Amino acid sequence: MTGVHLRVDNRLIHGQVTVAWTGSLGVHRLVVCNDGVAGDELQRMLLPQAARGLPTEVLTVAEAVTRDWGDDVMVIAKDPDDAFRLVEGGVRPGVVNVGNVAPRPGTNYTMVTRSIAVTVEDAAGYRRLAAAGVPVVAQLMPRDKPADFTALLDRKGL
């Protein structure tokens, strides 16, 4: 699967995605990719409703890597492990955009940007993505300049 727009955002579908990003990228379909979310019937029902009319699927990683949607889809991974598993399974995004990653209660995290919380385990996941040859950037909104995410991790000692 090439040409896919891949975003790590643990809030999944929200206004920044459905308005700013889809319009900027010209995406016409959203795919939420996370095994836990895909196994939760309530989230499978509510997330497409949050997509403001955009066709939306909620899939496991295994389901997602078997699909080929073309270049008008945005895949939203909940965490860097999901993103790495997608890349490992054959998804070839031009870049992985790390957007909003809110702190998870009970975790020891570092705020890498004002909107991205990273644990040591998450940092290892982002580095695996970069090592797989996929550029990883932090970019909250389309108008923001993308920042090299591994450099941000380096600055924070992660």
Image (cartoon, rainbow, N blue to C red):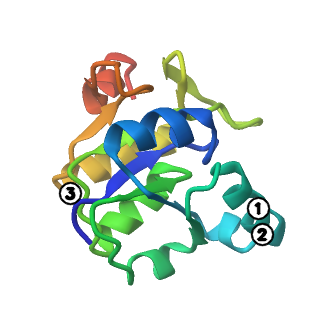
Q: Position of residue 88 (x, y in %)?
A: 30, 70
Label 3 vs 2, first from the N-terminus: 2
Residue type at mark 3 is: Ala
Tell me whether circle 1 and circle 2 mark residues in contact (CB < 8 Å).
Answer: yes
Tell which tag, 1 or 3, sits nearer the viewer: 1
**Residue at the spot x=61%, y=35% of the render?**
15
- Disc 3 residue crowd, few under 14, some 14–19, many 20+, Cα 10 Å: few
**Residue at the spot x=30%, y=52% of the render?**
128
Which disc number belongs to residue 43? 1
**Drawn side of residue 55 relative to residue 22, left or right:** right
Marks 3/2: CA–CA distance: 30 Å
Q: Residue furthest right?
A: 42
Which disc number belongs to residue 89? none
Q: Which residue is mark 2?
A: 40
Q: Is residue 37 above or below residue 102?
A: below
Residue type at mark 2 is: Asp
- Where does the N terminus fall, quadrant-wise? bottom left
Q: Position of residue 39 (x, y in %)?
A: 72, 74
Q: Residue furthest front?
A: 53
**Residue at the spot x=56%, y=57% of the render?**
54
Residue 98 visible to an observer of this rendering: no
Q: Which residue is mark 3?
A: 132
